Amino acid sequence: MPKFKYSAVDESGKNTSGSIEASTRSSAAATLRKQGYRPLNIREEKGFDPNDIQIPFLKKKVKNVDIVITTRQLSTMIGAGVPLVRSLNTLKLQAENPAMKEVLEEIAHDVESGSSFADALDKHQDVFSDIYINMVRAAEAGGILDDVLKQLASQQEKDASMRKKIKSASTYPMVLLVITFIAFFGLMLFVVPKIGDIIKDLGGPDAELPTTTQVMLGISDFMINYWYFVIGIVVAIVVAVRRYIKTESGKKKFHQLLLKTPAVNNIVIKIAVARFARTFSALMSAGVNVLDSIRITSGAIGNKVIEEELRAASDEVTAGKQFSEPLRSSKIFPPIVPQMLAIGEETGQTDTILIKIAEFYEEEVDNLIDGISSIIEPVMIVVMGSMVGLIAASVIGPISSISENIGIILLDLPLFVDIIIN
């Protein structure tokens, strides 16, 4: 019998987790409810299957654009009265991405076999997010699947647009940074050693060189003799940092660092607020209850510090407080967010007000990214120029000094010859 991992809330409002055996995910949820738990998340534990092993770059992948197009088309077809199974089969035939075609085929088969649409989606959590699945589940219960699918498509388009802007803004400085490192290593490995030989030939072995020049020549000699050691250290540091960031504690530390870094923290917070407002609004408008909406939204923001703060807020909501109350004492969310949320709670228009907040902060993010993008280019050029200038000054200075000394000796050459002869 299949085994399922679950997280749930007990009758006292405390979070709990564990595993349970059941024939299906739905029966596992029913068993938990009978035991007095309110299920939050249920995932099937899968054993080792050699067929699941796939080479990463050969693995078929469903892209976000495929999900957006499929969601919009499915919404249109259901709104026109086409049955769900027939809609899924039609979309399966039209799908251009083989991975999406395969997923749609499996979902259509599960729905045709009697599974709910949400449960069929839940088997493909690597494709559909918790937000997507829970909104569909709520839409099925309320009979508003076509409207919710439209919301999901719009929300995913907004998220994709924001990610694209952030990616495009970060690509240019990363390229410049890589070029800077390549230029530095190139100068140290090929240019500085030759100039160092020239300096030693002109000044002799006893020539006193400036401290900067000695440091540069020392770094160059070390990199030439121990280049494999340098590469090993760089690779080891990169791998260690990446692995540490993937751990729970490392991820939290990294997110704390982002929230404390000047300039970066402002962008991170605005992105988090925009994502929180749009996701929470979509879940509430789909009929998902407040506690589940907070839990799902906290995991969708992508920042562990903010996630923990929202989960702490959900505990206070469980105790009977309005959601806006714990957010008032937040050190991350701007004061306007709890104030607007409180108005939404009073008027019953929380989802509408949160959409306004999301649109406002998305515009703020766009302006910030545009401003930073215009600043990054001259800053990186200054950094590259400073690096090259430092190397040039450290090697050209001694050559100039030695050249002047040689010129003085050449000017006094007759007197020097007379002294030697006499």
Image (cartoon, grey):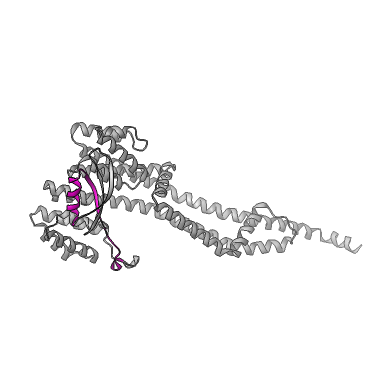
Residue 339: quadrant of the picture: top left
Q: Is residue 67 left or right of residue 392?
A: left
Quadrant assignment for the N terminus: bottom left
Q: Residue at x 20, y 57 (%)?
A: 69
- The residue that appears at 31% across and 35% down in the rendered structure is 327
Q: State the residue lying farthest toward the left.
A: 81
Is residue 248 or residue 374 the one in the foreground?
A: 248
Q: How many marks on residues?
A: 0
The answer to whether residue 147 is seen in the rendering is no
Residue 171 in magenta? no
In the rendered image, residue 315, in percent from the top left (x then y), is placed at 28, 37
Residue 55 in the image: x percent, y percent? 34, 67
28 within the magenta span: yes
Residue at 60 percent across and 56 percent down: it is 392
Note whether residue 104 is visible: yes
Residue 256's x, y, as percent? 41, 43
* Nearest to the observer: residue 340 or residue 86: 86
- Camera-side residue: 45 or 185? 45
Q: Which image quarter is the C terminus in?
A: bottom right
Q: Could you tell me residue 28's position as x and y percent?
A: 20, 52
Specify whether 167 is left or right of 289: right
Residue in front for this viewpoint, 323 or 363:
323
In the picture shown, does residue 349 fall above or below 96? above
Residue extent of the magenta highlight: 23-52
93 with respect to 238 (left or right): left
Which quarter of the picture shows residue 106?
bottom left
